[in-house]
Image (cartoon, helix red, strand yellow):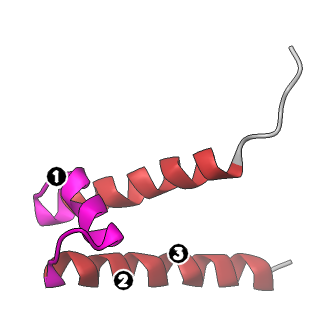
Amino acid sequence: MKRTQADPALYMITSLRGIYARIAHKLKCDPSYVSRVARGERRSQRIAAALAAEAMRAYKRLAKAVASR
């Protein structure tokens, strides 16, 4: 079976689902609500702060990976 290139948009969606699920689990809410806050459809300072912290965590991991090359 021939391997094909993964669609970057699909990868981004699945990785965001993981982030939303992780935040929802921590804050005891639904991942769809986290997604709505991220898209700006709803407002929640707690979820916005968790999203910002998760983004910073991902950025630091990426920077560390790039620096080690």
Tell me the number on the disc at residue 53.
Answer: 2
Q: Earlier in the sequence, mark 1 or mark 3?
A: 1
Q: Earlier in the sequence, mark 1 or mark 2?
A: 1
Q: Secondary structure at mark 2?
A: helix
Q: Earlier in the sequence, mark 3 or mark 2?
A: 2
Looking at the picture, how far across and down is residue 31, in whole percent? 24, 53
Tell me the number on the disc at residue 58.
Answer: 3
Label 1 with label 2: CB-CB less than 8 Å:
no
32 part of magenta stretch: yes
Q: Nearer the viewer, residue 30 or 37?
A: 37
Please state the extent of the stretch shown in magenta in the rendering.
25-45
Identify which residue is drawn at 51% across, 51% down.
13
Tell me how far mark 1 sits from mark 3, CA to CA.
Answer: 21 Å
Q: Magenta-highlighted stretch: main secondary structure? A: helix
Q: Is residue 8 left or right of residue 16?
A: right
Q: Secondary structure at mark 1?
A: loop
Q: Is residue 38 above or below residue 35?
A: below
